[in-house]
Amino acid sequence: MELSVNDTSTYLYTGGRPFDRQQPVVVLIHGAGHDHSVWNFQARQLAHHGFAVLAPDLPGHGRTPGTPLPTIEALADWVEALLDAAGVVHAALAGHSMGSLVALQTATQAPARITRLILIGSVAPMPVAPPLLEAAAHERNAAHAMINQWSYTPASQLGASPVPGVFLTGLNQRLMERQREGVLANDLSACNAYQGGLEAAARIAIPCAMLCGERDQMTPRKAVKPLQEALAKVPGGARMIVIKDAGHAMMAEAPDAVGDAMRGFLTST
């Protein structure tokens, strides 16, 4: 599916079903150096269970042309423009890593439009290690190797996969290589510079779930606590869901568990 967002043709994956804005809408926001394809399993699961799914390639990523946006705030503005272009009044947001910051900021900027929030692999602030920032800017292959090492569990590094025949780190390597030059460096810099996460979280008053990989090295469980505590206005408190035996790339390493957790939260009362 393609939509014109801010006068740019934008690609969106709808989970293999026609987009129907009369159904509950869920927007899935990918992380740094990625595109919509990181959501393939979860998008299909939600789309085939009564949700209207929009998983966009953010500006300058994947099949969406243009220049990647330099800040989390600019990306949140863009998500609002996407909702306008799709004719969506209300939507739930789910974001992974950088995408979680975008989802959080969007929910703060447009509180009347966002119904639920799912933050996956999220911390605030989200500092990026200087060696990774340097590698992303000047040596992409080294940056990709760092991300693979820190995003996947040792079993995945050795070839374990929930999908027979799929080498997860190799797949992620190709996905990052497909992005345009400078995209990863831009995205990591945006994450590193965003300092408004805890302030934004303090203003959230809609149901929120946080998914954390049990073996996440990039956004470890102990680092999630400040963000969870900042979500003090969330009805019943932010729901923490730990995905067993998964790292930061939990949508790939534990697709069933992540999809079930997302759908369970979105359908809960």
Image: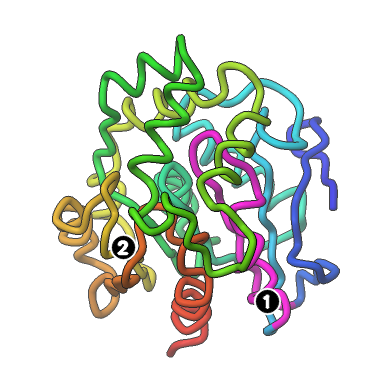
Residue ranking furthest to the front: 158
Vertical comparison of 229 with 182: above or below:
below
23 or 48: nearer the viewer: 48
The crowd level at tag 1 (other Cα within 10 Å; few <14, some 14-19, many 20+) is many
Disc 1 + disc 2, Cβ < 8 Å: no
Left or right: residue 213 compared with residue 90: left
Vertical comparison of 123 with 23: above or below:
above
89 or 144: nearer the viewer: 144
- For numbered disc 2, what is the local secondary structure? strand
Write down the quadrant of residue 214 in the picture: bottom left
Q: Could you tell me the amino acid type at mark 1?
A: Phe
Q: Which residue is mark 1?
A: 51
Name the N-terminal-most of marks 1 and 2: 1
Q: CA distance from mark 1 to mark 2?
A: 23 Å
Q: Could you tell me the amino acid type at mark 2?
A: Cys
Vertical comparison of 34 with 206: above or below:
above
x and y, in percent, of residue 121 in the image: 36, 54
Tell whether position 34 is magenta.
yes
Residue at the location (49% across, 52% down)?
A: 110
Q: Please tell me the numbered disc located at residue 212.
A: 2
- The residue range painted magenta reads 23-48
Quadrant housing the C terminus? bottom left
Front: mark 1 or 2: 2
Res 246 visible: yes
- For numbered disc 1, what is the local secondary structure? loop
x and y, in percent, of residue 80 in the image: 60, 46
Left or right: residue 162 compared with residue 11: left
Left or right: residue 35 compared with residue 92: right
Residue ranking furthest to the bottom: 269
